[in-house]
Image (cartoon, rainbow, N blue to C red):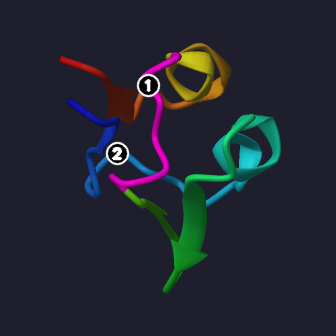
Amino acid sequence: MPAIINKDECVGCGTCVEECPSEAITMADDIAQVDADKCNECKTCVEACPSSAISVE
């Protein structure tokens, strides 16, 4: 499964966008969004997120 953003926890910092090697994350209305077709489930964003708002199940 692709990365999942907890919209209540996301602070809109953009760190995940910068760190994602597959460019699967973008920002919309100051909340991160994942393009499931691009996400390779590497968990780089999970490790980079300062607010622990991202998970990969």
25 vs 40, nearest the viewer:
40
User: Which residue position holds label 2?
Assistant: 9
Lateral position of residue 33 relative to residue 18, left or right: left
Task: Tell whether position 45 is magenta.
Answer: no
**Residue 39 x/y as whole percent:** 46, 41
Task: Give the x, y percent position of residue 13.
Answer: 69, 54
Q: Is residue 7 above or below residue 9?
A: below
Residue 57: x %, y % from top left: 17, 17
Left or right: 17 with respect to 56?
Answer: right
Q: Amino acid at mark 1?
A: Ser
The boundaries of the magenta stretch are 36-42
Task: Examine the rendered structure and indicate whether residue 50 appears above or below residue 11.
Answer: above
- In the picture of the structure, the residue carrying the numbered disc 1 is 52
Name the residue located 67 percent from the left edge and 22 percent from the top edge.
Answer: 48
- Looking at this view, name the residue that lies furthest to the front: 37
Local secondary structure at mark 2: loop
Towards the viewer: 54 or 42: 42
